Amino acid sequence: MTYSGRAPIYIISSLLVVMPFSANFNRFFQLLIPIALVLIIYLRFHLTLTSHQFEYKITISNITIYRKIFTSENIKKIKFRRIGWTTKNAVVKVRGGFNFSVAYFNSEQLIRELEEFALANHIEIQKTRDYQLLEKYYTHS
């Protein structure tokens, strides 16, 4: 199944706060901030899960800027943790590459599928105590 996510709103809002004060910057920064803002607005994250591998892709509009296919050999562990009060997150720890988070996808189903993927492929799972509390109190079975 394929999941899609967007860049967090706090990055976009922080650039909007900086823009009115950019008059004191030189011309380079006055052009750089709006360009960065437009790029972040169109930034998308895609994660496609299959039974033996998953593909992580970052695109701007329809242009792929990063694409990586992970198998169980590429993954050290998947760490499940809590963000905020009730938001679950998983961080995929990768051998020889960038670790990535699935917080941008906002999907409970993705978290469940990542856990099933880890169990099926014998990947180490680490759950924080806060995450275990979320599972206990907010999981509807």
Image (cartoon, rainbow, N blue to C red):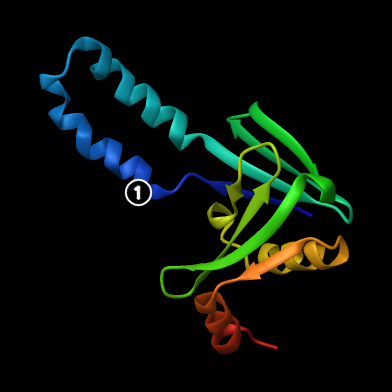
Give me the residue at 21% from left, 39% from top. 17
Q: Where is residue 122 in the image (x, y as percent from the top left)?
A: 84, 63
Q: Position of residue 135 (x, y in %)?
A: 60, 82
Q: Where is residue 6 in the image (x, y as percent from the top left)?
A: 52, 46
In terms of depth relative to the viewer, which is nearer, 134 or 104?
134
- Residue placed under numbered mark 1 in the picture: 10
Give me the residue at 47% from left, 75% from top. 86
When the figure is inspected, residue 136 is found, relative to residue 75, above or below; the finding is: below
Query: On the rendered image, what quadrant is the C terminus found in?
Result: bottom right
Instruction: Judge left or right: residue 121 versus residue 44.
Output: right
Instruction: Judge left or right: residue 5 versus residue 123.
Output: left
Quadrant for residue 1, please give it: bottom right
Instruction: Judge left or right: residue 53 versus residue 25.
Output: right
Tag 1: amino acid? Tyr
Instruction: Judge left or right: residue 34 versus residue 5.
Output: left
Quadrant for residue 114, please give it: bottom right
Neighbor class of circle 1 (other Cα within 10 Å; few <14, some 14-19, many 20+) is few
When the figure is inspected, residue 5 is found, relative to residue 87, above or below; the finding is: above
When the figure is inspected, residue 95 is found, relative to residue 21, above or below; the finding is: below
In terms of depth relative to the viewer, which is nearer, 137 or 95?
95
